[in-house]
Amino acid sequence: MIVALLFTLSHYQYTYKNIKITHAETIGVGHFQLRILIASGLSFSADSMEILLLSFLSMILQDQWDLSPNQTASITACVFAGAFVGTLILGPLGDRIGRRPVFLLGGIIISFFGLTTALSRTFEMLLLNRFWVGFGVGGLTVPFDILAEFLPTSARGKNLSCIEFFWTAGSMSVPLVAYITVGSGRSWQLFVMVCAVPCLASVIYGSIYVPESPRWLISCGRSKEALEILKQAATVNGKDIDVLFPKGVVLKDEREESSNFGDLFKPKWRKLTVNLWGVFAGYAIGYYGTIIAVARVFERVEDDMDSSETTSNDSGVDFDYSAIFISSCSEIIGTIIVLLFVDRVGRVPLQVYSYISSGICFFVLCFFATSDKRGLLMFFAFMLRVFEMAGNCATWLSITEVLSTEIRSTGHSAANAVARLGAFSSPFLVEGNISLRKVGTIMLAIHVLTAYCASHIPETKDVSLGEKKQNKVEV
């Protein structure tokens, strides 16, 4: 996998002896790019763990603190509320003060409040800490954008998709950490503290090795600083900077621009914004709805099984750690699908086919939920999560590429905020007294609408960041 993570830097326009030239400047494949990927990947992994640990923490505290169902649900809701606010603040901040400071700020917030969660002695204090963890998670888009802005067009698709392996690694780590801590009789406090470690590592590593984005510096008219970063990158990769950057070379200044959420509804961006928000809302409802629905389906199957085949734990909460771990592993397959096809079929077709396939799998799983064919249900549950992950990967890649530099963080964070609202609503759509067949029908319709919105996003395969070309896929 390390080989796939190595790549070359983007192309920059510069002037040489007062003559403007467009030049494909390659600084080589080496440690500089890998460092950025590791820092961004650790951030992704940490965010994944902080979100997915809620499935364990809420159940544990419901048992130990004797929480009501509404109180238990509010633990998860608080994190998504914080993430919603965080995306609205940290994203635009990345366009105003730079990618690097916001990247580090988000990591510090997650690390600090993730650790102080273990010190919570009251329900109110727990909610406050988890809200601020969610706020930091709201900055998830910024490290992803940093990585995108250091990638050339030819290598961007596969390499941006590689970061999703870190997300999957985080989701796979949560049940393992839970088993080692909670499952071995240790406290939930140790569980949440261990889950905060990757984010702390990301902050330390990123503060040392992650520079500011040259693209952002150029968009702010700070071309000299951008050139110095490119020279440092070339040096780290073992290149001769005197050859790559002859004396007298300066990067071409771009007009300084600032952005806010109102800019997303200017004629230039309005249609794209609506479609991106539709896709992000749909994928969030689908992803988190999948996790809830699969648990509900197999809980029903367990109820139908002979009592001699089930286990219980009278002394506390008991989790099927192996089943949760295997379910998380399916995301690896989804990420591999993106790596294999994202630069062949394109971002838009991959999203459309993935979301439609997810909707079909969701419908079939819910339709046959009362069936005694456990193997069939496990197959469709596995494939459902595969296609959800594939669609999500392609969506995150597409939005990063289709937005221009001056509005990228703002647009990405706004879409991510809409996704948080979708995630917040998913339990109300999937849980409750609604029959699973109705749930399957509703989720199929949502996935079709998501695919429709995705089909109207400009294709960015083989296109430079911020540029667009027309699609050939319609739904």
Image: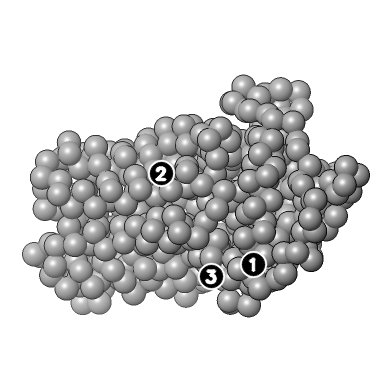
How far from the left and from the top, in percent, is residue 148? 64, 53
Label ID, residue 235: 1
Q: Is residue 414 visible?
A: no
Give the residue at x 51% y 47%: 100
Residue 386 shown left or right of residue 121 in the figure: right
Labels 1 & 3 near each other (Cβ < 8 A) = no
Choose the circle earlier in sequence order: 2 or 1: 2
Q: Secondary structure at mark 2?
A: helix
Amino acid marked by disc 1 = Thr
- Whichever of callouts 3 and 2 sits on the residue coming sooner in the sequence is 2
The image quadrant of residue 237 is bottom right
Answer left or right for 112 relative to 16. Answer: left
Q: Mark 3 to mark 2: distance in Å? A: 29 Å
Task: Give the residue displayed 43% in from the left and 36% down from the top.
Answer: 86
Residue at label 2?
105
Which secondary structure, mark 3? Answer: helix
Residue ranking furthest to the front: 247
Near-viewer residue (403 or 38): 38
Q: For the residues marked 1 and 3, what is the alpha-carbon distance in whole angstroms? A: 34 Å
> At x 36% / y 68%, what residue is drawn?
173
Q: Nearer the viewer, mark 3 or mark 2?
A: 2
Residue type pointed to by label 2: Leu
Quote the CA–CA distance across marks 2 and 1.
Answer: 28 Å
Front of the two marks 2 and 1:
1
Q: Look at mark 3 in the image and give the residue it sits on.
A: 332
